Image (cartoon, rainbow, N blue to C red):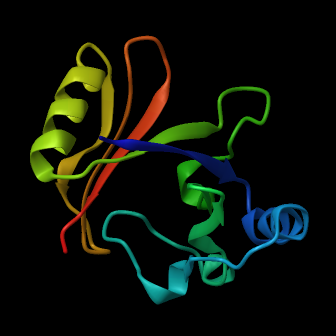
Amino acid sequence: MAQINPHINFNGNAEEAFNFYKSVFGGEFAMIVRFKDMQSPGVPIAGHEADKIMHIALPVGSNVLMANDVPESMGRVNENENRSKIYIRAESRQEADKLFTGLSAGGTVEVPIGDSPWGSYFAMFRDKYGIEWMVDCDLV
């Protein structure tokens, strides 16, 4: 069965926010990836953004709170609108494909499902109701 975890977009202060969340929830970060650690083709990163967060994950109980900083080249996140995504970790490529195909029907695909630069099977899209989703599956 797929697992659902929240994912939040930040305007450059993801690390600050997650240090705060860590102080509240406790625990340790499961992952921190900075833009300088992994340049993604098609997403230009300005030099002053190299230390910003590309991906951060904080386990909270059986769930994981995740986030990233949105590069300036992609525009600011409107904090009065939906700036979060629902993240689904699928158990298989087949489940990821089924979820992606079903949820994205009639919506707008931002990142088509496929192998990601960080080693997973990944897609990102907005459904026909305007809800933003990420579908991910470990390739291991």
98 or 70, which lies in front?
A: 98
Residue at 32% of width from left, 74% of height from top?
A: 118
Image quarter (top left, top right, bottom left or bottom right) of the C terminus: bottom left
Residue 95 point in image, percent of width and height? 17, 41
Q: Is residue 85 left or right of residue 128?
A: right
Is residue 57 visible from the viewing direction of this image?
yes
Image-quadrant location for residue 100:
top left
Residue drawn at x 77%, y 66% as measured from the top left: 18
Query: Left or right: where does residue 132 sit relative to residue 22?
Result: left
Measured as percent of width and height from the top left, residue 37 is found at 48, 88
Q: Is residue 130 left or right of residue 122?
A: right
Tell me the quarter of the image containing the N terminus. Answer: top left
| Number of dots carrying numbers | 0
Q: Is residue 69 visible to the viewer in this orientation of the structure? A: no
Q: Is residue 111 above or below residue 69?
A: above
Image spot of residue 12 (x, y percent):
74, 63
The quarter holding residue 102 reads top left
**Residue nearer the viewer, 127 or 1:** 1
* 40 up-or-down from 80: above or below: below
| Quadrant in the picture for residue 31 | bottom right
Seen in the picture, residue 64 relative to 54 is either above or below; the reply is: above
Residue at the left extreme, as displayed: 94
Q: Nearer the viewer, residue 132 or 72?
A: 132
Residue at x 48% of width, y 31% of height: 132
